[in-house]
Amino acid sequence: MNTFLTHPWVFRAARNGAKLLANQQDVYMPTAATEYEEDGDPRFLNVVIATPVYSLQECCLMLIRNLVEEEDYGRLDIPESLKTDLRQQPDLLKELGLINRLRMLT
């Protein structure tokens, strides 16, 4: 896939929005091609997309989010702190805004 050097990439699983890593990073920033084909076109660089190692708590929260409707979280017989964690679902737009603000600082 062609991209620009200034465009960060964030990868998420289609099923549950779980965070994926690109070359072992939360946010992948493209780099300039250092190798070129014989015709002068840049050689595409491979990016390895992988699932990070999640804690047991994170795995359980993802599973509960898939099985229980958000409006029913309050009825679960679990500590309030876990109910709060359940409600803090991944928000890609929020994360992209944070990435953009961090890039502006550097």
Image: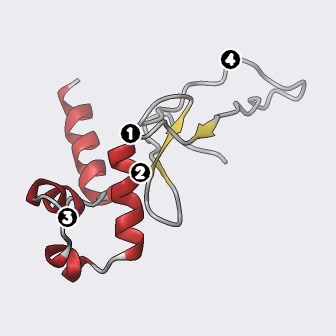
Residues at circles 1 and 2 in contact by the CB criterion of under 8 Å: yes
Q: Are marks 4 and 3 in contact (CB under 8 Å)?
A: no
Task: Identify the mark at residue 55; answer none if there is no mark.
Answer: 1
Residue at image location 21% in from the left, 81% down from the top: 72
Going by the numbered disc 4, the residue's amino acid type is Thr
Please state which amino acid type lies under the numbered disc 1. Ser
Badge 1 density bin: few <14, some 14–19, many ≥20, Cα 10 Å: few
Q: Nearer the viewer, mark 4 or mark 3?
A: 3
x, y percent for residue 33? 66, 24
Query: Would you name the residue on which mark 4 appears?
Result: 34
SS under mark 2: helix
| Residue type, label 3 | Arg
Q: Which mark is residue 87?
A: 3
What is the x, y in percent for residue 92?
Answer: 33, 57
Q: Estimate the spatial distance between the alpha carbons at disc 2 and disc 4, rounded to whole Å.
A: 39 Å
Tag in front: 1 or 3:
1
| Residue that carries the numbered disc 2 in the rendered image | 59
The mark lying in front, picked from 2 and 3, is 2
Residue at left offset 27%, top offset 61%? 89
In this rendering, position of residue 94 left or right of residue 60: left
Residue at left offset 77%, top offset 29%: 43
Quadrant of the image containing the C terminus: top left
Query: Residue 53 placed where, x, y %?
Result: 48, 36
Residue 104 in the image: above or below residue 81:
above
Mark 2 crowd level (few <14, some 14–19, many ≥20, 10 Å Cα): few
Three-letter residue code for mark 2: Cys
Q: CA distance from mark 4 to mark 3?
A: 44 Å
The residue tagged with tag 1: helix, strand or loop? loop
- Residue sticking out furthest to the top: 34
Q: Name the mark on residue 88.
A: none
